[in-house]
Image: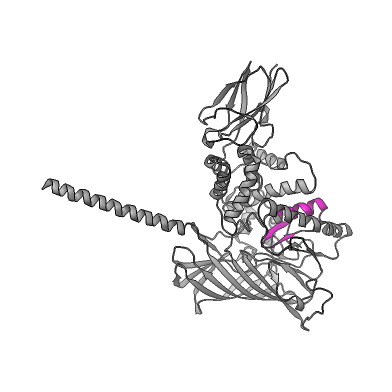
Amino acid sequence: MKKFLFLVFTVGLIASCVQIKKASYQQTKESKVTTYWQQHISYAMDIDVAAEKHQYSGKQQAVYTNNSPDELTKVYYHLYFNAFQPGSQMDVRSLNIVDPDRRVRDRISKLNTDEIGYIKVNSLKQNGAEVLYETVGTILEVTLNTPIKTGESVTFDMLFDAQIPLQIRRSGRDNKEGIALSMAQWYPKMAEYDFEGWHTPPYIAREFQGVWGDFDVKISIDKAYVLGGTGYLQNPQEIGHGYQDASKALNVPNTAKLTWHFKAPNVHDFVWAADTNYQHDVLKTETGIDLHFLYKKDLAANFLQNWKDLQAKTATLMTYYSKHIGAYPYKQYSVIQGGDGGMEYAMATLITGERKFGSLFGVTAHEMAHTWFQFLLASNESKHPWMDEGFTSYISNKAENLILEEGRENPHAGSYRGYNYVVKNNMEESLSTHADRYETNTAYSIASYSKGNIFLSQLEYVIGADNVAKGLKKYFIDFSFKHPTPNDIKRSMEKVSGIHLDWYLNEWTQTIHTIDYGIKSVAGREITIERIGQMPMPIDLEVTYTDGAVENFNIPLRMMRGSKPTAATVLEDWGWAYPTYSFKTSKLVQSVTIDKSKLMADIDSENNIFEVK
């Protein structure tokens, strides 16, 4: 009887294990299908602008598709213009931070009623039925009548009024160069929902994230204004203003206002700018991409010449980025005078235009590069601004160095100086810090722009420049038109190099461990190196012998499980827990130098060179 019971139990256990294995396999199979998803939205908007009042009314229809595996009971919109009001979180943050943005400072607190910004939602319907909503600062919280199920699309109809704030940060009217309207983050914008949940940070001053989708936008405004921005103009024959071939007859309506109709496919933002004094030039490139340039006609002669000189160089930039990252997928790109410095948007950038040529080209190079890093590779720039600003700085530095023939051996040297500054002044914060939560603007800027840049430039030191170049292209192929995460760039680099990089991602982006290696001793033919900083790295050494011969060595980090392609002599790998590493050379040593390329962000270069006396 016991044997029978044992047999029944055993058979049942085996059957149960088989079922579990089948279920596990089925779950794995299904998870492969649903590993990645992203939401989708289609906007149709009609905007009526009262330019003299700096106000506009809007009608928005948004078709939102829930591609997530979750049932949604709420949705959220960003109302960015609400930040430009006295007492807003952006205002109070700027008043209290120790190093406020010079463009903001206390300016929001001093805005008059007719200078503030706002977006007021007057009505909102879900599939034709009124829905409950509440405005909380820069976020509209919507409680749905019925949940949005997985795979379901719903239609939201909204009526809203808005006032354009005095130009302070990115958006606004009457900027310092006299541009009438810089219309960035101007519409109720659906918040992103992804595998981490809803992303609804208040607008404090930092960057943005949006849902991939399509835009159909009609803007009615006084006919004296010239517009430029995201999307393709659908009715140039009714507009003129440089959009219509001069040899063709215009069909401009005899009305006080013109309606500009734009469509933008597969983008996650929409910007426009308007001025009564814009010069509009179009450069048609050999690749079939039209480059639009809008700038004030009455700029000083030297600035006007700079804008003319910029145009061919911008075409060269487009070619460079398309070659080194991935092909630009749209048919046009616009460089528009406006805003408060330089800021990237879908198919366009707003930049201030009264600059020396080097500065004008530099800001254009940087903002255009954002088309790839954050717009096509749409990382969450609030959570990971280093993937946005840092990668953009990396590729634009390279482009500028080549196109302007600057001849810099290390075009990223400025980023290394910035990084060393915050380290030595105890201001550094982890790259994993949310963009809004850095203690200082300096720490945010150096982390995002400089340390983010060094993530890639230093990676050239770790896995080799060719592998980084290949990795960027693979990253684009695998994650363009998606929302990549830090792990995604790491995996792209691992796949092309065959080198394990989990340690690198962790140490450089999730800690503030520093790199410091030194040459501890040289005795005859024996060299001993020590790791002083907490972050481990592979080591490149240049050794000069007493007979004048030079030999290069590479010491891989054991955690890499491999080494970069190199002509150097590859030595036994170094386990990070060992504080020192010794090896013997074939000849007597005269001098030793650690990392002659200076791509490793070693915080103390004084101990990187040893000369035998």
Q: Is residue 335 magenta?
A: no
**Residue 130 x, y percent position in the rendering:** 50, 78
Left or right: residue 582 versus residue 115 is left
Residue 411 locus on image (x, y percent): 73, 42
- Could you say which is closer to the camera, residue 316 or residue 54? 316
Mark yes or no: residue 156 visible.
yes
Question: Horizontal placement of 123 versus 52: left or right?
Answer: left
The vertical placement of 150 against 370, above or below, is below
Q: Quadrant of the C terminus?
A: top right
| Nearer the observer, 481 or 506 | 481
Extent of the magenta region: 339-366
In this rendering, the answer to whether 105 lies above or below 152 is: above
Q: Is residue 610 visible?
A: no
When asked about the image quadrant of residue 205, the answer is bottom right
Residue drawn 53% across the image and 64% down it:
39
Q: Is residue 355 magenta?
A: yes
Q: Position of residue 450 (x, y in %)?
A: 66, 45
Extreme-right residue of the structure: 301
Left or right, residue 512 beside residue 362: left
Toward the viewer: 410 or 422?
A: 410
Give the number of marks. 0
Q: Pinpoint residue 521: horizontal percent, then vertical percent.
A: 62, 20
